[in-house]
Every structure is written in structure tokens, then in C-alpha cells.
Image (cartoon, rainbow, N blue to C red):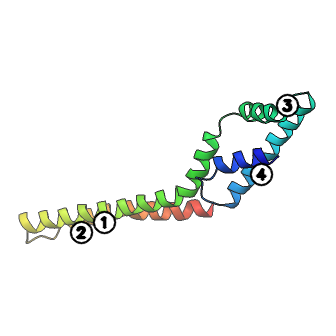
Amino acid sequence: MKEIATYVERTFESVPDSQRKSEIMQEIIERLEDSAGKLEQDGKAREDAINKAIVDFGNLDEILQELRGQETGKGKALSSLWFAVIGSLLVIALTVFINLYYSPGVVWFLYPTFAVIWWPLCIFFFGKWRKGR
């Protein structure tokens, strides 16, 4: 039924193309066509059967949100890593400034630097570890 395929394609047009999107769209189309076909066999008009099948299927917002989340997960991880790197650099720069301004004869800024550098390293390696799972 072309109307159902058009409805599903229009609903999913804001989601970037992927294999997962195609599989989900195909499954939704098949279910809606089966439901509409059964309603037509029960005596409903074609258009009414299609509309009832779509309404009975429910809201697709959760599926759309999940697909968008999968596609942007990589971008979120990358922005999180950049945030950690920039934040670490700012904290390190602050400790260097404080060290040089208040106690220039003693180099102590290295100790908090080693502690702060773990923040972006943990995010980076946790992302690598999750990919391997």
C-alpha cells in the first residue's frame, strides 16, 4: 500500500539514513499493511483501514528519538571529550599561573596536572572500551 509507505517515509525523513533506519521502516510498513489488510477484509473502506491501522499502531516519537540518538551518539562523545580536554587545559593553566605567581621557586603545579589529565583520558579510553563491547 503506497499510502502507508509514503506516511512512514515522511515520518522518518528527519532521521539520517542508516541500515537500522531502513530495517525499522520496513518492519513498520509491513505491520501497518498487515493491519490495514485485516481491517479491509473485515469490511472497512481502504482509506479508513489505513487511517485506523496508523492510529492503532501508535506514536512513532520514541522510535524516532532512539534512531536520532544512535546517530548522534558519536557526536555527543566527541563533544564530551573536547569539553574534558578544554576544561583540563584551563585548570592546568590556572594551577601554573598560581604556582608561578605565588611560589615561583617551587614547582608544584605538576602534581595537580597529573590528577587533572585523567579526566579526558578516562573519557577517551572509556569510549574505546565501549566500542569494543
Upstream in sequence: badge 3 or badge 4: 4
Q: At 56% from the left edge and 51% from the top edge, which residue is drawn?
A: 69
Side (left or right) of 84 relative to 127: left
Three-letter code for the amino acid on which mark 1 is drawn: Phe
Relative to 71, residue 63 above or below: above
What residue is disc 4 on? 26
Residue 123 seen anywhere in this rendered image of the structure: yes
Q: Secondary structure at mark 3?
A: loop
- Image spot of residue 30 (x, y percent): 82, 46
Q: CA distance from mark 3 to mark 4?
A: 24 Å
Side (left or right) of 22 relative to 92: right
What residue is disc 2 on? 110
Determine which of the numbered discs, if any, sits on residue 114 in the image. Answer: 1
Determine which of the numbered discs, if any, sits on residue 45 in the image. Answer: 3
Q: Foreground residue, 36 or 104? A: 36
Q: Are marks 2 and 1 in contact (CB under 8 Å)?
A: yes
